[in-house]
Image (cartoon, rainbow, N blue to C red):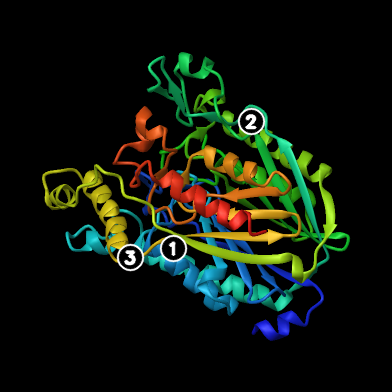
Amino acid sequence: MACNEESSKSQAFIQIAPFVADVTPPLGSPIGEKKALRIIDSLTARGIVLVGSGEPIVLCSVDWRNIENGATDVWRNALAQAANTSRERVAVHHVHQHDAPRCDFDTDHILSEYGLSGSYFDPEFAHLAIENTATALRDSLQDLQQVSHIGIGKSRVKKVASNRRILGEDGRVRLVRFSRCKISEAREAPEGIVDPILRLLVFWNNAKPVSALSYYATHPISYYDRGEVSTDFIGQARALREKTIGDEFLHIHFNGAGGNVAAGKYNDGSENMRPVLAGRIEEALKSSWEQQSKVSISPSEVEWITTQVNLPLHPDLNRQRLNSILSDESLGKRPRVLAARTLSYLNRRQEGKDLEIGLLNLGPASILHMPGELFVEYQLAAQAMRPDRCICLAAYGDAGPWYIGTASAYTEGGYEVSPECSLVSSEAEDVLLKAMRSLLIAV
């Protein structure tokens, strides 16, 4: 369906087209550190197209572990073409379930030079998944629905999120509390810094709910690394809400700034905990729905703006060392793959390709679309910048830089801010906060 700015400006209302596509990997393809042995849940790419305020705006969330570097460009370009819009008005995020595919065509290109193509992910399947998602988006534009109101709700999530980093008396990381944790001392420690609030935005066509976007900051995994493809507890909660609302309603979840947040305090990694965690998320979604306030929305209240950021590199990154690892056939496959993945990000930086931050304003609500695996402090900072608005944050956009910690985190040590896991330096905090503030104060 063609849509241009001139025709959109003449509309007195916003229109929406929800879309969903199956992006479940084939058995035998890489997922995390394993190969797909069993499909527990079908994975989806799901999103919305907003029409009626300039060129169409596309928001998409994918049930994959990572979408990185050039793969982010491929996804955005394909969806932009399908929606007849520009790439700058397309946001693609991954939910970050660990029993799900990664996607980085730049890394696979590097690996192919060493006979390791397909070691990080299945590129043929990835291209097909992107094509299928673009087709689903294009088809959805044949059934645009009016948006008369936006519903805004929020609720506290109980006993899911806990901070992963537990500091000792010396101010350095003493324990890391991962998504599954059986260390008694770590589980008994306080929750730490989290954002316990789940936020919900609902698109209404008068009395009919069409689609909803939810935002919550935590690693979305319970038990994992067993080769069992799954949407995990976030996907289960999402499915429960769709079943409850019914009538072709599409629920889309975006993971917030949960880089240093996981369910470890409340999750021992046993199978029975997955539905328990899903139930706690579903309860917060239900409460948010019941408490939502509906406000009318017009095209003049919908705005999409972006800015570019250049994040300083981690000082301990060494291209010569990475090339040496990649060339060393005596090493296992995993360190060589990770070296290629780091090199793909360094190459993009050398080529002058910056990261992008997007902001979508919807009446009294604003959604920040952010790159990387952000620490939760960025989400809390965004909310503090505009306490007069409902601020939602979608992290896990371009995963190129991997973890992005706070400046103080790089002095505290720990897994997340090592050069193997974070490709940026402590100076990234200042760059990101300035960019976030420039977008939010423009509202």
Closer to the eye: label 2 or 3: 3
Q: Which residue is mark 1?
A: 72
Residue 233 lies in what quarter of the image?
A: top right
Distance Cα–Cα, label 1 vs label 2 = 33 Å
Q: Quadrant of the N terminus?
A: bottom right
Closer to the eye: label 1 or 2: 1
Residue 410 against residue 187 in the figure, above or below: below
Q: Which percent across, then down, holds residue 398?
A: 44, 56
Distance Cα–Cα, label 2 vs label 3 = 45 Å
Residue 414 shows in this picture: no
- Whether residue 45 sits left or right of residue 251 in the image: it is left
Q: Residue at x 51, y 47 (%)?
A: 433
The dot on residue 276 is 2
* Callout 3 crowding tier (Cα within 10 Å): few <14, some 14–19, many ≥20: few
Residue type at mark 1?
Thr
* Callout 2 crowding tier (Cα within 10 Å): few <14, some 14–19, many ≥20: some
